[in-house]
């Protein structure tokens, strides 16, 4: 945990309880997840009940209370992408990085998720790594794509 950066986030919002979700989002961007220790610190710094912080952290899918990899992979498995070969792309990614959707590899390099739609149905199959979307990928292109991420 980078305390200086996290303290910078708290200082930026100066204890404003109304900034709770924004603070949580920024800390998660920094840490890739929200640990119990961080959730307690958020509660204390913003003077918001811990129960509320926990409820938000577990309700919204965008928050994670389990460690995530440095690189988050999302593969669209919606109908259009599925028809265009998303399952083959997903199978290839799983084989290459050794995890299933919802998991993070042991060295916390990658986390893998499936999503129902990324909004570009005519460009499937779609894969997003760290907010960068790739479209019309074949299974053969996946290994080269993943090599770009340290």
Image (spheres, rainbow, N blue to C red):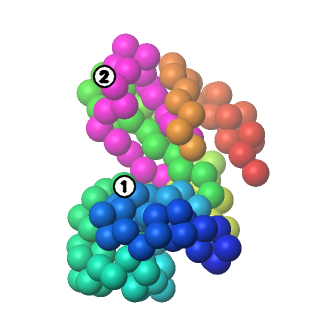
What residue appears at the point 26 percent right and 27 percent down from the top-left corner?
79
| Occupied quadrant, residue 117 | top left
Closer to the N terminus: mark 2 or mark 1? 1
Q: Are marks 2 and 1 in contact (CB under 8 Å)?
A: no
Q: Is 86 rendered above or below residue 122? A: below
Position of the N terminus by quadrant: bottom right
* Position of 21 relative to 15 (above/below): above
Q: Quadrant of residue 44?
A: bottom left
Q: Nearer the viewer, mark 2 or mark 1?
A: 1
Q: At 60% from the left edge and 68% from the top edge, which residue is drawn? A: 8
Q: Position of residue 55 (x, y in %)?
A: 23, 73
The answer to which of 97 and 27 lies nearer the viewer is 27
Q: Secondary structure at mark 2?
A: helix
- Depth order, front residue of 8/41: 8
- Where does residue 63 sit, x and y in percent of width and height? 38, 61
Q: Which residue is mark 2?
A: 80
Q: CA distance from mark 2 to mark 1?
A: 23 Å
Residue found at the very far top of the displayed protein: 122
Is residue 38 among the parts visible in the rendering?
A: yes
Residue 114 belongs to the span the image colors magenta: yes
**Which portion, as a residue range, is magenta?**
112-129
Marker count (numbered): 2
> Which image quadrant is residue 110 in?
bottom right
Q: Is residue 62 above or below residue 67?
A: above
Which x, y percent locates residue 10? 51, 70
Residues packed near mark 2 inside 10 Å, few (<14), some (14 to 19) or many (20 plus): some
Question: For the residue labelled by badge 1, is the local secondary structure a helix, a strand or a loop?
Answer: loop
Residue, disc 1: 62
In depth, the one of 62 and 53 nearer the eye is: 53
68 to the left or right of 82: right
What residue appears at the point 32 percent right and 70 percent down from the top-left corner?
Answer: 17
Give coordinates of residue 106: x percent, y percent.
62, 70
């Amino acid at each position: 945990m980078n305390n200086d950066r996290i303290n910078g986030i708290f200082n930026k919002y100066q204890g404003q309880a109304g900034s709770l979700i924004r603070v949580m989002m920024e800390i998660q961007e920094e840490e890739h997840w929200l640990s119990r220790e961080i959730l307690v610190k958020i509660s204390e710094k913003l003077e918001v009940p811990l129960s509320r912080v926990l409820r938000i952290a577990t309700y919204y899918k965008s928050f994670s209370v389990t460690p995530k990899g440095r690189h988050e992979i999302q593969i669209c498995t919606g109908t259009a992408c599925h028809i265009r070969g998303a399952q083959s792309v997903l199978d290839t990614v799983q084989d290459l990085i050794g995890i299933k959707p919802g998991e993070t590899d042991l060295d916390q390099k990658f986390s893998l998720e499936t999503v129902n739609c990324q909004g570009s149905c005519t460009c499937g199959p779609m894969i997003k790594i760290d907010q960068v979307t790739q479209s019309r990928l074949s299974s053969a292109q996946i290994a080269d794509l993943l090599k770009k991420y340290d």
